[in-house]
Image: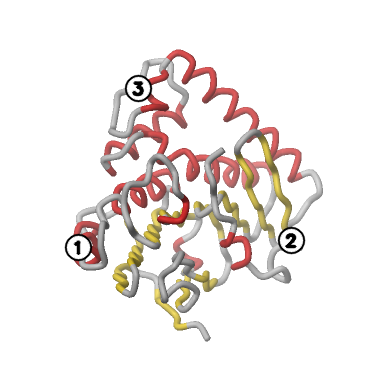
Amino acid sequence: MIFEPKTYRNSFSKERFQSFVITCNDSDLWIGVDPISYKDEMSAVALKKLRAIQDALKIYIANDSFLKKSLKPCKVQENAPDFVRSMVEAAEKAGVGPMAAVSGMYSELIGKELMENFSINELVVVNGGDIYMRLQKSLVMNVFAGESPLSGMVGLEIDAEQTPMGICTFAQTEQTPLNFGKADAVIIACKDAVLADAFTTGFGNLIKKPSDVEKVLKRTEHFEEIISAVLICDDQIGIRGEFEIKLLS
């Protein structure tokens, strides 16, 4: 089971979001909904969708095992589900293997399933460090960055008008087979959580030391899909995009 830090769950107000958790196999998702919109049956709908995605992915990988193993962009078979195609397309843009986008894919598809089945004002789906959200007012999300002295010291103010969107995080502390960089945190925001997830791995793999932050930040400018980017390695931080950074006490 790949370790996924659950720290981001603590970023969201218990007064603003009524939450529940769904788990299946190696997936563990925290879902927050505004109390007015919350329905007890949301958990069952979300879990059913999660199981369906996992089953479809398992069936596809049984006939295309290279997709699961590849650490580089690869082609997809003609019978691939739409969500697999979205992972492959995101991986191609980010220069990583398709499975680097799987966590963001789960967050986004579960979030969309809930919004399609219920009238929801605000929604947050947290899958490790990969988040899909829909907001009605701005929200400041703490930036957690492992052993960096900057961890927990700054927050990213999310503009509600940009949502629904994905905000995904690459962290050195995750120690997954897909992570080769030394960044304490790479946070990428895109309209598409699948793409944001792939980008975090792609850019995170490029950061080997603090002095890499500036040049990698410049590389994020080549992708118009990126709404905001935050890169942290040790005491170095790079920030660009449309969201404001807040200093936290």
Percent across and percent down for residue 85 are 39, 29
Q: Distance between the residues labelled 2 and 3?
A: 38 Å
Q: How far apart are marks 2 and 1 (CA)?
A: 38 Å
Q: Nearer the viewer, residue 207 or 197?
A: 207
Residue annotated with mark 3: 76
* Residue at x-position 29% and y-position 27%: 74
In which quadrant will I find the N terminus?
A: top right
Determine the residue located farthest toward the right in the rendered image: 40
For badge 2, the amino acid type reads: Gln
From this view, report whether residue 90 is shown above or below residue 165.
above
Mark 2 vs mark 1: which is more N-terminal?
2
From this view, report whether residue 130 is shown above or below residue 144.
above
Residue annotated with mark 2: 18
For badge 1, the amino acid type reads: Lys
Q: What element carries label 2?
A: strand
Q: What element carries label 1?
A: helix
Percent across and percent down for residue 230 are 35, 66
Residue annotated with mark 1: 218
